[in-house]
Image (spheres, rainbow, N blue to C red):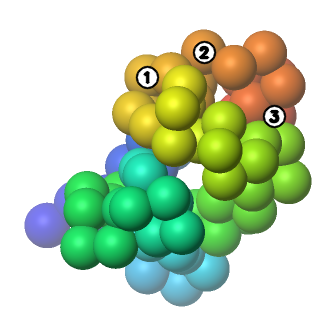
Amino acid sequence: MSDPICPLCGRDIPPDVPQSLHHLIPKLKGGKGGPTVLMHHICHREIHATLTEAELARHYNTPETLRAHPRLAKFAAW
């Protein structure tokens, strides 16, 4: 079985690398029990360092919109 792919950076997530579940709609904005995506922990931290909960809920609630954000796109190029 192959490793999952991080939806932000597009790289494999090996089992020995820290990983996180990201709620596409933040729990505080009604996303509890909603869709989640598995990603690298470092990618998840960058999302929350870049965007507010309100921005995530309103405009950046899909992997595609997250990847389109200029700062996150630059970060994902690591």
Name the residue furthest left: 1
Residue at point 51%, 42% (across, down) = 57
Image quadrant holding the C terminus, namely: top right
Label 3 vs 2, first from the N-terminus:
2
Does residue 71 lie above or below 8 as drawn?
A: above
Q: Nearer the viewer, mark 1 or mark 3?
A: 1
- Image location (x, y in percent) of residue 75: 81, 34
Image quadrant holding the N terminus, namely: bottom left
Q: Nearer the viewer, mark 3 or mark 2?
A: 2
Label 1 vs 3, first from the N-terminus:
1
Q: Amino acid at mark 2?
A: Ala
The residue carrying mark 3 is 75
The residue carrying mark 2 is 68
The residue carrying mark 1 is 64
Label 2 element class: helix
Label 3 element class: helix
Is the C-beta separation of discs 2 and 1 under 8 Å?
A: yes
Nearest the eye: 42 or 62 = 62
Residue at point 45%, 37% (across, down) = 61
Q: Is residue 41 left or right of residue 51?
A: left
- Image location (x, y in percent) of residue 56: 59, 42
Q: Within the image, what quadrant is residue 3 found in?
A: bottom left
Calculate the distance from the C-alpha at mark 2 to the C-alpha at mark 1. 6 Å
Residue at point 60%, 15% (across, down) = 68
Name the residue furthest bottom: 16
- Image location (x, y in percent) of residue 8: 55, 39
Calculate the distance from the C-alpha at mark 3 to the C-alpha at mark 2. 11 Å
Label 1 element class: helix
